[in-house]
Image (cartoon, grey):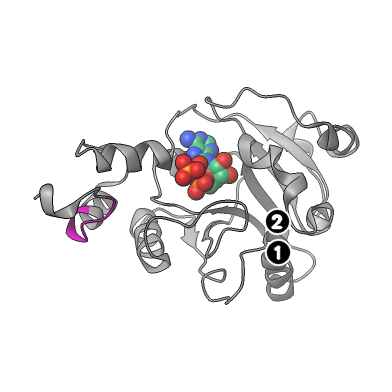
Amino acid sequence: MTRRIGLLGGTFDPIHIGHLRAALEVAEQFALDELRLIPSARPPHRGAPQVSAEARLDMARLAVQGVAPLTVDDRELRRDRPSWTIETLESLRGELGAEVRLFLLLGWDAFCGLPGWHRWEELLEHCHILVLQRPDADSDAPETLRNLLAARSVADPRSLDGPAGQIAFVWQMPLAVSATQLRERLAAGRSIRFLVPDAVLAYIHAHGLYRATPSTQE
Ligand code: ATP
């Protein structure tokens, strides 16, 4: 049987139930052998993450502990360059071979930003793209993506075929949570319990992460 591997990149600053539920539901829906969370080092499309790469990696690892088939892949943190997704895909293909089916998960917001990505037109040579619904995103697809969608999208995600090349929309349980909201809550001294796994919450508190003014919040 051809292996089926899902990929979810992100800053995971911090990882939360929106990422984790989406990953798990896609893994179930597409009978994936593995779904890799790939924390990005220096995200080319946005500002610097608020905490270190090491802390974001630790939190991602804690979040997936014992949750097969979710795993964490740290290759982008081992690269001393911006985290270009196309290079991650090339490196994965080099390791996993041409046959394996790769599914790149992108939230709707990330998908709409695709035309700004380095060598974005080559992405589909290496993977299928699964676009995740996000309840807080209601924009139309940008003009540049319309032709691509017309040529490559399939109406039924179950009909995705071959190792790469198609786009499907995936509907999972809507969870309108974002890392930005969580950072704001933490900075305001409010609880984020149940929005991240308990082990992640314990790590955040143990390392004093995301506090606005550490000295005043003890
Ligand atoms: P921030 O608020 O810092 O921008 P974020 O919560 O959007 O962070 P990222 O690490 O940027 O998280 O997201 C990684 C990927 O997960 C992106 O493709 C994003 O669209 C998707 N994603 C994030 N939150 C959700 C959610 N609640 N539901 C579905 N997909 C999500």
- Residue 127 falls inside the magenta stretch: no
- Image coordinates of residue 31 in percent, x first then y, are 60, 46
**Mark identifier at residue 184:** none
Describe the element under mark 1 as helix, strand or loop. helix
Where 129 falls versus 87 (above or below)?
above
Pick the quarter of the image with the N terminus: bottom right
Q: The disc labelled 1 sits on which kind of residue?
A: Leu
The image quadrant that residue 214 belongs to is: bottom left
Q: The disc labelled 2 sits on which kind of residue?
A: Leu
- Residue assigned mark 2: 102
Of callouts 2 and 1, the N-terminal one: 1
- Tell me if label 2 and label 1 are in contact, CB under 8 Å: yes
Per the rendered image, the range of residues in magenta is 205-210
Describe the element under mark 2 as helix, strand or loop. strand
Residue at horizontal 66 percent and vertical 66 percent from the top: 88
- Residue assigned mark 1: 89
- Give the residue at the far left of this rendering: 218
Crowding near pointer 1: few (<14 within 10 Å), some, many (20+)?
Answer: many
